Amino acid sequence: MSSEEIDAYLAALDEPQRSTLKALRNTIMEIVPDADQSISYGMPAFLLQDKVVGGFAAFKQHLSYFPHSGSVLPALKKDIKGYATSKGTLRFALDSPLPRSLVEKLLAVRIDQAFDAKLRKRL
């Protein structure tokens, strides 16, 4: 699995989904540059030490961010106000990337859940 698979996933999308998700991908990689890029459950995913810490997907009427943990979004209730959510999905507009500050928080909560304190310091 590699970044080429995510390239192919994005290339198959129409605009504005493609540009919006490319921006999200770039943001994720800036925040966690050591993340491995892959496809998980048919969607782009980002892994640290074989643990998925985030992902996204395109749908007909919206885009979704997947924290790959059902407890990330409840931990960020105030930050995600105004977004449609389900237990493990944050939905956002086709043409509006998630703000970097929100992506940072989503990833930080997930990484905190996935790794102990000593490991987090090395990431």
Image (tube, rainbow, N blue to C red):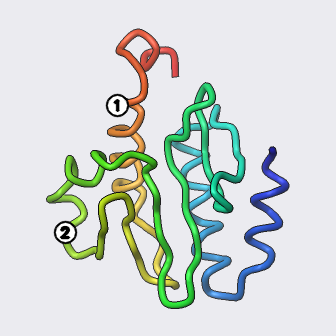
Residue 44 lies, with reference to residue 34, above or below; the image says below
Q: Nearer the viewer, residue 101 or 78?
A: 78
Where is residue 119? Give x, y as percent: 46, 14
State which quadrant residue 44 falls in: bottom right
State which quadrant residue 91 falls in: bottom left
Secondary structure, mark 2, is loop
Left or right, 41 with reference to 11: left
Task: Determine which residue is flagged by label 2.
Answer: 81
Residue drawn at (67%, 77%) of the image: 18
Secondary structure, mark 1, is helix
Residue drawn at (50%, 49%) of the image: 54
Mark 2: give few (<14), some (14-19) or many (20+) Cα within 10 Å. few
Q: Marks 2 and 1, how far apart in space? A: 21 Å
Where is residue 112? Give x, y as percent: 35, 29
Tell me the kind of residue under disc 1: Gln
Q: Residue 7 carries which label?
A: none
Task: Determine which residue is flagged by label 1.
Answer: 113
Mark 1: give few (<14), some (14-19) or many (20+) Cα within 10 Å. some
Left or right, 16 with reference to 72: right
